[in-house]
Amino acid sequence: MKLIIQIPCYNESETLEIALNALPKHIAGIDIIEYLIINDGSSDNTIEVAQKWGVHYIVNFRRNKGLAKGFMAGLDACLRNGADIIVNTDADNQYCGDDIEKLIRPILEGKTDIVIGERPIDTTEHFSLLKKKLQHFGSWVVRKASKTDIPDAPSGFRAYSREAAMKLNVVNEYTYTLETIVQAGRDKIAMTSVSIRTNPELRKSRLFNSMFGYVKKSMLTIIRAFMMYKPLRFFTIIGSIPIFIGILIGIRFLVYFILGTGNGHIQSLILASMLILLGFQTIVAGLQADIIAANRKILEDIQYHVRKIDYDKANQFPIQKDIPQDSE
């Protein structure tokens, strides 16, 4: 059983060594533990720190691509290098490395395929009250959208089985945390969470510049994922709003018409017709999107089998230590 621990990095030379030193070297049930970093266009000496420490693999972007692309590139490299379990953690050492054993235990026992680390949000000192409330609200929205019971959706401390990792797709460029939960929930991939510990803050988060930006990007990510995986339901809800308003306006016109004063309310009839037509057009768009979503599921199944063949072949060849991802 092989475990690869991946760490996305962007200018992490000051904290990376601390995070690497905290990672486990031996875990019961794991034969091999290896370490991989994703250098997301760092301008400092992050790569040198990783090489000096002795990480096994380096996925290197020549310019910053964002957390989501870095995460997927890391999964790809881990799978190509024979990982049975992949753990994703952060380079700022915010997660307790000793909890990795606890994180992967449900996968080792065959109980699940994805495990999300649940942080003690309410007792984390460097989280503001507003951030705590938003974290809880965001997790609640993700639970509703994914039909799961994951209490800490934004947590980046998570473990994936090989099978689960081969099924994941991330299309947004912001973050992978929310979209992968929605996808896994909708695709019925077994998923659970375990309580984990966090360390004192070493640096401020670079994922967003403001709380408003964080909320906006998170909500857009959730809405987009919901549109992708349940398009008919999404567009039916949106289309029902103008239809309902149009019907109410139409009833109002009929009342005036029956009372003999309808001539002065022709505008209401026109508006009602336009709203009802708009609503039906929106629902028709949902039907089209639902057909596209069905085709996407077929393509995802094909992609999974192609990936499985590709990664199985990749494991037969010598492993490359530095894995470049682009030439930009």
Image (cartoon, helix red, strand yellow):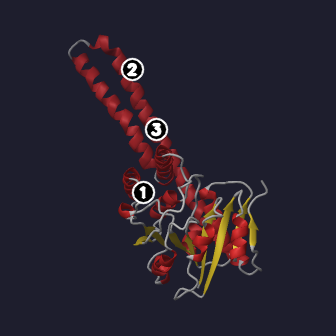
* Whether residue 151 can be seen here: no
Position above or below: 274 against 207: above
| Pointer 2 or 3: first along the chain | 2
Number of numbered discs overlaid on the protein picture = 3
Position above or below: 21 against 296: below
Query: Can you tell which mark lies on residue 282?
Result: 3
Q: Quadrant of the N terminus?
A: bottom right
| Image point (46%, 61%), residue name | 186
Give the amino acid type for the residue marked by disc 3 in the picture. Answer: Thr
- Residue 77 is left or right of residue 243, and the answer is right
Give the amino acid type for the residue marked by disc 2 in the picture. Answer: Ile
Q: Secondary structure at mark 3?
A: helix
Residue 271 image position (x, y, % from top left): 38, 22
- Residue 52 is left or right of residue 17, and the answer is right
| Pointer 2 or 1: first along the chain | 1
Along the line of sight, the residue nearer the viewer: 183 or 252: 183
| CB under 8 Å between discs 1 and 3 | no
Q: Which residue position is annotated with label 2?
A: 270
| Image point (69%, 58%), residue name | 42
Quadrant in the picture for residue 319: bottom right
* Whether residue 95 can be seen here: yes
| Image point (68%, 70%), residue name | 77
Q: Which residue position is annotated with label 1?
A: 127
